[in-house]
Each structure stands twice: as structure tokens, then as C-alpha cells.
Amino acid sequence: MSPDRLVYMANQIGAFFRSQGPDRAVPGITEHLKKFWEPRMRRAIIAHLEAGGDGLAPEVRAAVEALKGAT
């Protein structure tokens, strides 16, 4: 899956959780990525973040950082 598609999908997840505020959104996004994204998708979004993370919404960026620390 292309990084652009992963960014789009992650930002869609972020949009869903955004209304809960950053204190709940970031953990919610992180948990969603852990539960529903397969390992190679998680590795790919982490690699995209490490390459600069272009296009990731701020709360999604924070969630991927947390995901990175959890793997």
C-alpha cells in the first residue's frame, strides 16, 4: 500500500477521533492502528513518519509516534 494511501486512511481515523479532544484522540487513534492495521501497514506508516511524515495531521503524527514506541 502506498504511503499516500496510508496517510489518507490514518487522517480519516484521526478525523473520527478529533472531536474527542487531543487527550482522548491520540490514544484512540493509536489503539485503532494497533487493533485494525496489519503489522506491515503499521511499519509502513512508522517509516513514513521517520521520513518526515508529510501529510499527517498533528494528532495522527502524535499517535504514530506513540505507536512507534509501542512496537
Image: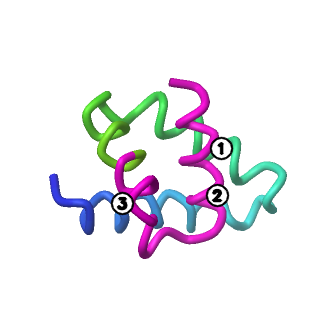
Towards the viewer: 64 or 9: 64
In the displayed structure, 64 sits above or below 36; it is: below
The structure residue drawn at horizontal position 47% and vertical position 39%, both measured from the top left corner, is 33
- The image shows residue 1 at horizontal and vertical percentages of 15, 52
Asked if the residue under mark 2 is in contact with the one under mark 1, i.e. CB atoms within 8 Å, the reply is yes
Q: Relative to 10, is 32 on the left or the right?
A: right
Identify the residue under disc 3: 9
**Residue pointed to by mark 2:** 17
> Which residue appears at 68% of the width and 65% of the height?
18
Question: Of the residues under marks 3 and 2, which one precedes in the sequence?
Answer: 3
Q: Which residues are magenta?
A: 47-71
Q: Are marks 3 and 1 in contact (CB under 8 Å)?
A: no
Q: CA distance from mark 3 to mark 2?
A: 13 Å
Quadrant housing residue 40: top left
Q: Label 3 to label 1, Cα distance in Å?
A: 15 Å
Compared to residue 38, the image places residue 28 above or below, namely below
Q: Amino acid at mark 1?
A: Gly
Depth check: 65 or 10 in front? 65
Q: Position of residue 24 (x, y in %)?
A: 78, 49
Q: Earlier in the sequence, mark 1 or mark 2?
A: 2
